[in-house]
Amino acid sequence: MAQQTPSSNTTTGSSAPDGLAQKSVERLPESFYTQFLSISALKRKPSPIRGLFPLEKTPGLISLLAGKPNPSTFPFTSLSFKARSPTNPDEELDLTVDGDELRAGLQYSDTAGTKPLIDWLFGLQERYHGRVRGEGWRISVGSGSQDLIYKAVEAFVNPGDPVLVESPVYAGTIPMFENLNCEQLEVETDAHGICSTSLRSILENWPAEKPKPKVLYTVPYGCNPTGMTATLERRKEVLQLAKEHNFLILEDDPYFYLYYGTAPRYPSYFNLEETYLGETGRVLRFDSFSKILSAGIRIGFATGPTPLLNAIDMHTATSNLQSSSLTQAIAATLLNAWGYDGFQAHIDQVSAFYREKRDIFEKGMKKHLAGLAEWDTPEAGMFFWFKLLTKDGSEGDSKAIIETTAFNRGVLALPGTAFLPNGRKTAYVRASFSLTPEEDVDVALGRLREAILDAQKEATGA
């Protein structure tokens, strides 16, 4: 199906970030998205039961619809938990989920998420991204952002389709595209994020007889694995290319709240499409609570054009039905107790924690890997991406060194090839600094140093 850009509805934009002129905003119409839906998504029918759930809320209606278990049979009567105060680390908050909130948390709920959590998330997106509710976008909660990304890929990509992926790329997405036999087009990245020149080259040299890619996947903050954060200029250029070449941006941003750089935070693609591009509806954003509240709570959320979220929800309704109502109730109770200012205080603490972990790890790298590796200092996230240097200046291969020599020395990391869509060799390595205590950092990097020297001796026969 040919991709075309139709006329749009004009709306008034929200306040622009500093340095960006406000524009009148065009909202892409619902009919625009049909061209982006996969054959599978177009064939998928709404759940005959879940599609009618909203009607149960009609005043005066007696519902005989759903096979929901009777909550009087559930043994749970109250759930209480303690949480640290975000403004006073010595204080603990006593929180309880009971009454109607608990009954809702123990029952099947709306596919897109429970109302208390969804309402709180709308306020969050307005606060951090300047997007106002009721402008053609909405939110769906998933069992972690990975769940939602997988469903988005299934909804937009057909087997064999070309897809644009930044490279190196989060390894968790590679199997999604491989399972669909996609042509993964690697867009180069550097310390400033995704390279718009590389993206433009791919698109402007695209064969005229071949349909262009419909989606670009990118992790703009603290990218896993590179740790890079895309600059404002790069983001603006990518958005402009999305409009020129008619593709959607899958903005996977699990490290957005783990930013600890000294420069002001760059606005998201979701913000910039309104304040800079002047056209909304090309960005589907993925957020996660895994890095800031709990990985085990399994709550992520997608934000974007309603037709795209509808396609994801139809998949959910026929697979896992919904994200856990109970963990949503727990999260909503905590977040409403904190409020948005409390949430900000919490993420400030989380960011400061990871900044300190980064600094400790980089200190150890300078001590043990100077002259043996090179790297850029991350400003967000929890990873270092470093290149192993060879004595003769040739392009090395980290795989054997990391998987065998380093492992035998007692240190485990990931060779960079795991993050390259087409699996080619690379001299790069990913190391996570999120968990390792300071005393173990020094030991681990000392062992890695010895492994690199062992490999160099073996290569030269010395």
Image (cartoon, rainbow, N blue to C red):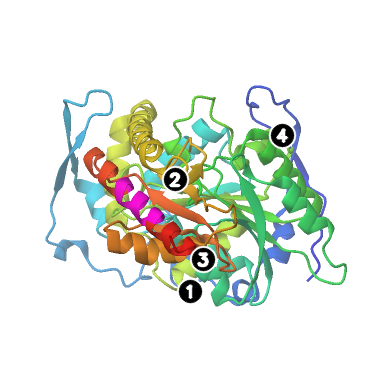
- Farthest residue, direction right: 208
Separation of residues labelled 2 and 1 (CA atoms): 48 Å
> Residue 246 location, x and y as percent?
77, 55
Q: Which residue has dot 4 on it? A: 276
Q: Cα distance, mark 2 to mark 4?
A: 31 Å
Tell me the tag on residue 48.
1
Under mark 2, the amino acid is Phe
Tell me if residue 254 can be seen.
no
Determine whether 354 is above or below 39 in the image. above
What x and y, as percent, mark residue 57? 41, 55
- Closer to the N terminus: mark 2 or mark 3? 3
Farthest front residue? 462
Crowding at dot 4, Cα within 10 Å, few <14 / some 14-19 / many 20+, comes out as many
Q: Give amino acid for label 3.
A: Lys
Given this view, does label 2 or label 4 mark the residue nearer the observer? Answer: 2
Mark 2 falls on what kind of element?
Answer: strand
State the residue in front, 306 or 21. 21
Question: As shown in the figure, which amino acid type bears the numbered disc 1?
Answer: Pro
Mark 2 and 1 residues: CB-CB less than 8 Å, in contact? Answer: no
Q: Name the residue under label 3.
A: 151
Where are the magenta residues, as a range? Answer: 445-453
Circle 4: residue type: Tyr
Q: In this view, does 425 lie to the left or right of 109?
A: right
The residue indicated by pointer 2 is 384
Residue 33 seen: yes
Separation of residues labelled 1 and 4 (CA atoms)? 41 Å
Mark drawn on residue 189: none
